[in-house]
Amino acid sequence: MSLHIEPNADALMHAVTNWMVDLIANTLKQQDRFTLALSGGNTPKSLHLLLASEAYRHKIDWSKLHFFFGDERFVPFNDERNNAKMAFDTLLNHVPVQPEQIHIMQTEHITPEASAAAYEKILHQYFNEQPFSFDLVLLGMGDDGHTLSLFPGTAVIDETKKWATHLWLEAQQMYRITLTAPIVNQSAQVAFITTGANKATALKAVLEGPVNVHQYPSQIIRPKGSLHWFTDSAAAALLTHTA
């Protein structure tokens, strides 16, 4: 596990963006596509805007990127809570990516169960018989230690076979579609991006506390490839080991 700490959120996003640009370029020297799973929530917005900016947009061969999503709220695409809508608004509408290489989780005219099954089918088409699944999965972490739609105490944490599944989240009164640990843990690279003092307690528990994946689901992410934590000083304030 590699820990990257920057003084503030702005410096952190530049660090992540520079790291991604290099990773994508180096990976595409070895293969003809780069598969990237995007995260939902608020943290990725500034990262997306930076990637789409004049400073970075031309440093990436967008025609070779294939986009996926870590999880999705089961609301219509035009709903402001929809992760895919956020990604299109902040990134995908502003870079020359091929539409057929963007794979959203369907949330309209379909049941949650069928949506998860359809997404799992797409994943198998891409990743069966491959040494790794995604080239990079971007993840966030909630104040409660959740990641993806793996929330504390939910049965999806124990999933061992399905690559995508659905769940009803009582606290939010909605269904969610999510990738599971088995597919994410086959990735070549996983990068958590965590900012703010409100994440400090959970970050310390996840990185330095005893393993309890049902209380801190982010602990279940242990990729076959490399694991990176990108954090600002506020989120890392309680960590004992920061070197």
Image: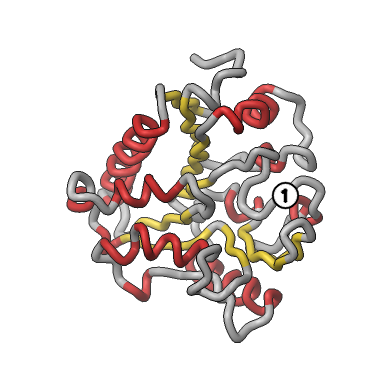
**Residue lying furthest front in this view?**
80
Q: Position of residue 94 (x, y in %)?
A: 27, 62
* Residue located 57% across and 71% down the image: 119
Categorize mark 1 by other alpha carbons within 10 Å: few (<14), some (14-19), many (20+). Answer: many
Measuring from the top left, give residue 114's x and y in whole percent: 66, 79
Q: Residue at x 65, y 38 (%)?
A: 143
Q: Is residue 173 above or below residue 131?
A: below
| Helix, strand or loop status at disc 1 | loop
Q: Is residue 181 above or below residue 101?
A: above
Residue kind at label 1, given as amino acid type: Phe
Residue found 57% across the figure and 14% down from its top: 241
Residue corresponding to mark 1: 151
For the residue pair 243 and 173, the one nearer the viewer reads as 173
Left or right placement of residue 31 versus residue 145 in this view: left
Q: Quadrant of residue 75?
A: bottom right
Q: Residue at x 32, y 36 (%)?
A: 14
Q: Is residue 116 above or below residue 27?
A: below
For this view, does 68 lie left or right of residue 124? left
- Towards the viewer: 77 or 242: 77
Horizontal side, residue 82 vs residue 16: left or right: right
The one nearer the camera, 156 or 78, is 78
- Residue 178's quadrant in the figure? bottom right
Does the rendering let one see residue 172? Answer: yes
The percent position of residue 52, horizontal first and vertical second, equals 27, 53
| Residue 238 location (% of width, % of height) | 61, 18
